[in-house]
Image: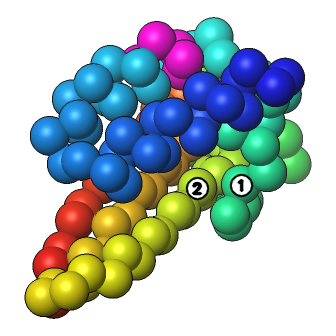
Amino acid sequence: MLIKRILLFLICALVLGCQRQETAVLIEIKNLIVEGKTTEQEILEIFGKPTSITSLPRFQLVSKDLNIPDELKSRLISIENNMPSRLKGGEIWNYTQINIQKGRVFNTLSSAYLTVIFDLDGVVSGYHFKSARTRY
C-alpha cells in the first residue's frame, strides 16, 4: 500500500513538476489501469479516495412490464445487451490535484485530472488523464 502511495506521489510530482513528463505519466497510468479488468478496489488502492464520484443513470430500453410484441422486445433486448457498458450505468470517479508555485517573476499553476469510468460491475470501462501548466 505504501509503495502504491509513493508511486501516486511520484506520478503527480512528475505531472506537476514538468509538463514534458506527461508522456511518461500517461504510459505509467496505462500500465496501472486496464480497461475491462481493473476494479474499483484496485483504483482505490492505487490512487486513494477520489475527489468526486458521479453515478451514471441506468439506461434500459425494455421494461418487463411493457406490453409489446415478442419480436420487437427481442430486438430491443439485443440492442440493449450490445450497448457500451458506460450506457448501462456505473460511476465516474474524478481525481484532481492543483499546485501553485510562487516564483520571483512568475507564478506557476499546475493541475492534473484523472477521470475513471466504471461499469455496473465496478470494472473500469474507460479513463482519461489531462494535465496543464500555466504561468501568470
Q: Quadrant of residue 69?
A: top right
Q: Residue at x 52, y 62 (%)?
A: 97
Q: The C terminus lies in which quarter of the figure?
A: bottom left
Residue farthest front in this picture: 104
Q: Position of residue 15 (x, y in %)?
A: 35, 46
Q: Nearer the viewer, residue 121 or 130?
A: 130
Disc 2 designates what residue?
A: 95
Q: Position of residue 94 (x, y in %)?
A: 59, 57
Q: Position of residue 102 (x, y in %)?
A: 33, 82
Q: Secondary structure at mark 1?
A: loop
In the displayed structure, would residue 40 be above or below residue 38?
A: below
Q: Amino acid at mark 2?
A: Tyr
In the displayed structure, would residue 101 be above or below residue 24?
A: below
Disc 1 designates what residue?
A: 50
Q: Position of residue 29 (x, y in %)?
A: 45, 25
Q: Residue at x 23, y 35 (%)?
A: 21
Q: Amino acid at mark 1?
A: Pro
Horizontal side, residue 131 vs residue 12: left or right: left
Residues drawn in magenta: 30-34
Q: Is residue 77 magenta?
A: no
